[in-house]
Amino acid sequence: MSDHAISNARAWAGTICEVMTAFTALESGEVESVEFDGSTYDDADDLRQRIDEMPLSVQVRGGWYTPGDSDGFDAKPEEFEILLSTGGPALRIYGKLNGYGSVDGAPDLEWQDWGTPWTTYSEETESEVDAICAFAACFWFGE
């Protein structure tokens, strides 16, 4: 186990929880402004743009299909990855998609360090799990 990778995952889980709490409060009108990452936001759209800029990449992939099968070319994405950091350590949010390009179930926060496979981070709190689900749902995975 990599202590550095676990620390990275723990920090990202806290950051995601913080930004989603701020976004929810601002979007619902519960507050007029929020502080996040050293900036003040008084518009939910501006904070949403900041959320969109947090990942290094957002990718999807589809399932198996027969080459040359016309249905294969209409295949919809089935899995997604939101890459948060790379190198030693790397961190991603990985999950399944429903047939409409939306998150299906709770995605996993996964870490990887040099020479290790992707490993599910299992120390998040219930509020962090909820925030990670909400964070992943901010992204569009359709075409």
Image (spheres, rainbow, N blue to C red):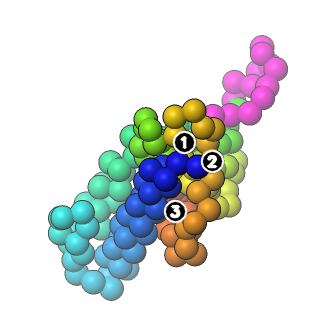
Q: Position of residue 14 (x, y in %)?
A: 42, 67
Which amino acid is tagged 1? Gln
The residue beneath circle 2 is: 119
Whichever of labels 3 and 1 marks the residue nearer the N terminus, that label is 1
Q: Nearer the viewer, residue 95 or 69?
A: 95
Q: Position of residue 110 (x, y in %)?
A: 57, 50
Q: Nearer the viewer, residue 115 or 139?
A: 115
Residue 67 part of the magenta segment: yes
The residue beneath circle 3 is: 132
| Rendered view: 85 above or below 47 | above
Of circles 3 and 1, the one toward us is: 1
Q: Secondary structure at mark 2?
A: strand
Q: Secondary structure at mark 3?
A: helix
Q: Residue at x 33, y 59 (%)?
A: 48
Q: Which residues are magenta?
A: 61-74
18 left or right of 140 in image:
left
Q: Are marks 1 and 2 in contact (CB under 8 Å)?
A: yes
Whichever of labels 1 and 2 marks the residue nearer the N terminus, that label is 1
